[in-house]
Amino acid sequence: MRAILVDDEPLILAHFEKIVKDIHGIEIIGVFINPNEALTAILQTKPDVVFLDIEMPELNGLEVAEQIQSSFPQTNIVFITAYSDYAVKAFELNAVDYLLKPVRHERLVETIRRLNKSNTHPKAPTRAPMICCFQSLQFKWSNDLSQKLDVRWRTNKARELFAFLVHYRQKPVRKDMILDLFWPDTDWDKGFTQLYTAIYQIRKTLGSINFDIRITSHENSYMLDLNEVKVDVDEWEKGINECSSVTRDTLPVHQKLIDLFQGDYLAENDFIWAENERERLRTLWLNHVTKVSKFLVANGEYAKAVELYDRIQKRHPHVEDSYFMLMQLYDRLGERYYVEQQYEKLTKMLADEFSVRPRQEVQIWHRNWKKNLR
């Protein structure tokens, strides 16, 4: 295991170098007093582990760690500090461990054991991992969407914070914005402690299921880097945008896209911050299923069109056109009872929700339909 040691105090650094050399399996490839020189060497040599002092002039050890994590997140970091208060911040940066000065041999041996354990985790399966956001937050493999992974969250707050970071995936999110949303009534210092703890819990949860998702800290922001992990919402929307017009040949693809919409975006938890995206995706689904439904009607496949308009009505009960289309389709299928049922449902919905009657076009159609029954 290739290691670099960084501490601005020469005597402490010399002592630490000596006890590290006494431990089997560690090769020291650099020892630095100047943190800027250390960072340059770290970025060039890409060591397996960096033992890093926190309290240093010019460039704080936490700042060095953030730059390392941004460039080489696979590099392990062990902080060395005289103050235990830095432990929470260490975990925020995903440090493997932190050591209190003066460092004891026995404690360092325990850290090396943790390092060896973290480096021998089994590799992630070759199947492509996926985060699912339709209806509820779940983790699955993209080639087996029916089998969800058993993920145990330490707290509901950590679960929601992860969903929030997924919502803003690949974009920086300011920490003060997170505090205002998740801990609005908590004082600043305590709020940051809770934030760091939640980020640490998220990282541990992701590690437990071998999803290579990184949360990087850049100055006053966090950013979720998905790497190769897919999000079902992104894949679905990509399919919608790339799919050609509806034809006999493309109809199965369009129907599959309709079925992939398993429920509203994060609907199970009804997060307030997700409402705009929830509505946007609902509208996108509505436009797509309406397009497919019109194709089925134009080609005389009324029963299949009924199924789709019924799904539209259940998901968008305030869309008047779905009731009217179902009335016309049931008429073509000779289902008189269901024509009347749809008109009554529409009348009640409009009265209850908007205190209005069906538009004149619908009323005229319904009157003519009843006359033709005589």
Image (cartoon, grey):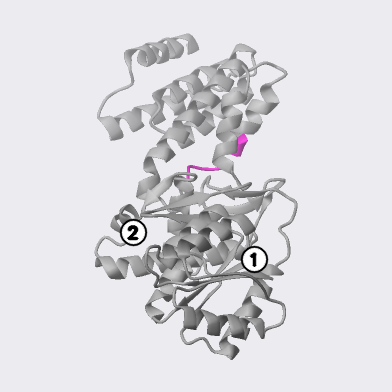
163 falls in the magenta region = no
Nearer to us in this view, 307 or 38: 38
**How many tags in the picture?**
2
The residue drawn where x is 41% and y is 36% is: 279
* CB-based contact (under 8 Å), mark 2 and mark 1: no
Q: Is residue 340 above or below residue 210?
A: above
Q: Quadrant of residue 83?
A: bottom left
Q: Amino acid at mark 2?
A: Phe
Residue 208 on image: x %, y %: 62, 66
At mark 2, the secondary structure is: helix
Look at the picture and state if 328 lies above or below 136: above
Residue located at (62% from left, 18% from top): 296
Q: Is residue 127 visible?
A: yes
Image location of residue 18, percent across then percent down: 60, 84
Is 204 on the left-hand or right-hand side of 56? right
Q: What percent of the width, then of the height, locates residue 360?
A: 32, 13
Residue nearer the viewer, 73 or 276: 73
What residue is at 69 percent from the left and 21 percent from the top? 250
Which stretch is magenta?
259-265
Q: Earlier in the sequence, mark 2 or mark 1?
A: 1
Residue at (34, 66) in percent of width and height: 192
Give residue 48's mark.
1
205 and 62: which is toward the camera: 62
The amino acid sitting under disc 1 is Asp
Check disc 1 and report its element: helix, strand or loop.
loop
Q: Name the residue tied to disc 2.
A: 182
Camera-side residue of 144 and 16: 16
Q: Residues within 10 Å of mark 2 (few under 14, many from 20)?
A: some
Quadrant location of residue 54?
A: bottom left
